[in-house]
Image: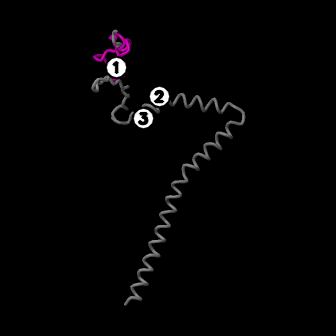
Amino acid sequence: MRRRSHIPSAAKTTDEFNVGHSNPVRHRRIGVWDYFEQRRPSARGFPGLHWVADIRHTLPYVWQMVKDLASLEHCRILFLVYFLSEWFLSMVPAFQLANQGQMLDVVREEWHSVVRALTVFSR
């Protein structure tokens, strides 16, 4: 009985994928595995800011979606309500953090006054 190869025949052909040519796919051999990774286009002049290129690429689609939603009846009001509620919910952690910081200041002041009172009584 002949043993079947674990690599699909489509991956073996050289005309589908050639490592030597400039390709948006990077090939690495890790042990017995072939690892194919899509190369991300870097933003010009700023390595590591590939998310800027992603946003720029998807912006026309987002704009088209907003235009389509605005053309629907009553959708502008619902979109505004959704946007404001999401903004409010995103601000809740910031308000909680500010409130906790103020509470820590109050507790610290009270603690110092208790320590001062105890040092006066202990003398």
The amino acid at mark 3 is Trp
Per the image, the residue denoted by label 3 is 51
Q: Earlier in the sequence, mark 1 or mark 3?
A: 1
- Observer-nearest residue: 121 or 110? 121
- Observer-nearest residue: 112 or 46? 112
Asked whether, in this view, residue 110 is left or right of residue 45, the answer is right
Q: Residue at x 38, y 28 (%)?
A: 40
The amino acid at mark 2 is His
Principal secondary structure, stretch drawn in magenta? loop
Instruction: Quarter of the image for the C terminus: give it.
Output: bottom left
| Residue farthest to the front, as pictured | 1
* Residue 91, above or below 101: above
**Residue 43 quadrant:** top left
Residue 65 drawn at (x, y percent): 59, 30
The amino acid at mark 1 is Asn
Q: Residue at x 43, y 84 (%)?
A: 117
Is residue 28 found inside the magenta-colored segment of the image?
A: no
Q: Earlier in the sequence, mark 1 or mark 2?
A: 1
Residue 23 drawn at (x, y percent): 34, 19
Span colored in magenta: 5-26
Distance in Å between CA atoms under marks 2 and 3: 10 Å
Per the image, the residue denoted by label 2 is 57
- Packing grade of label 3 (10 A; few <14, some 14-19, many >=20) is few
- Observer-nearest residue: 35 or 116? 35
SS of the residue at dot 3?
helix
